[in-house]
Amino acid sequence: MRDLLEDIFENQPKDPMLSARQGAKVSLRKRFYRQASRGEATDEGHPLLLDGKPVKTPARRTLVAPSAALADALAHEWEAQASEIDPARMPLTRLANVVIDGIAGEPQPVIDEIARYLGSDLLCYRADEPQGLIAQQNELWNPVLDWARDELGARFVLVEGIMFAEQPTGAIAVARAAIPSEPWRLGAAASITSITGSALIALALNAGAFEADKLWAAAHVDEDWQASQWGHDAMAVERRAARFAEYEAAASVLRLAP
């Protein structure tokens, strides 16, 4: 089983869009198990079992979740696979592999990367026109910045246009202190930061300050405005759906992890 799982998650395209474009070129493994379930809790956590046997990550570590609810979500993802196992449809398992194999042993580079986003966060860069877009940015972005100011003590500077502007070092420092250190939460926050372009959105979601759907909408104000003016592009819609699946997986980790 270990070798099969290594092949499933190491030798497949990590980009769901690439997987979809390659179509028949992607060789998917047949489903080789009857049942996915959560095992009894151990000192390490709650293991994922396939036909009663523990699952290993690509780096041959045991795939265990920090909560029973999260282990159940992983098992549900595996149960949802039909005749073939498609990694593109398993964002939670992919995130789990990243957390266990990469982040747990070396969290500091991930924390540093999220902190770098704070210096040029999406929510700080505002349009100077048209008024409709400005109003949408204010409506969806200002509450997150207000939360950062009121709850974290981080006062970020708004910038009109796309020219880079330095943010106050004090704001970055106190926001950085809110980056979660627990590996699963850190991995989820890193994923959300990368997907949305905003570390502040990731921190707000980690804190449970806003609903995930509202923050997803905030991350796509500009994109949605353009679509309202010029229509939807089919490939862009497909890419967004793939990103949303990743976002949902990360949001579920923040909701279900201790």
Image (cartoon, rainbow, N blue to C red):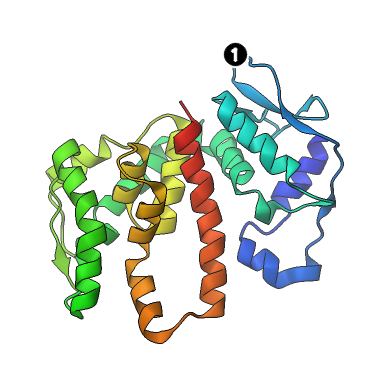
Q: Position of residue 7 (x, y in %)?
A: 78, 47
Q: Is residue 14 above or below residue 173?
A: below
Q: Which residue appears at 59% of the width and 13% of the height?
A: 43
Q: For numbered disc 1, what is the local secondary structure? A: loop
Few, some or many residues within 10 Å of mark 1 (<14, 14–19, 20+): few
Q: Residue at x 64, y 37 (%)?
A: 74
Q: Is residue 106 visible?
A: no
Residue at figure coordinates x 39%, y 36% from the top left: 108
* Residue 154: image location, x then y, percent: 16, 43
Quarter containing the C terminus: top left
- In the rendered view, tell whether residue 179 sits above or below residue 213: above
| 167 on left or right of 214 | left
Residue appearing at x 48%, y 30% in the figure:
257
225 left or right, relative to 130: right
Q: Tag 1: residue type?
A: Asp
Q: Position of residue 94 (x, y in %)?
A: 62, 45
- Count the numbered circles shown: 1
**Which residue lies under the disc numbered 1?**
43
Q: Position of residue 240 (x, y in %)?
A: 51, 66
Q: Is residue 174 left or right of residue 257?
A: left
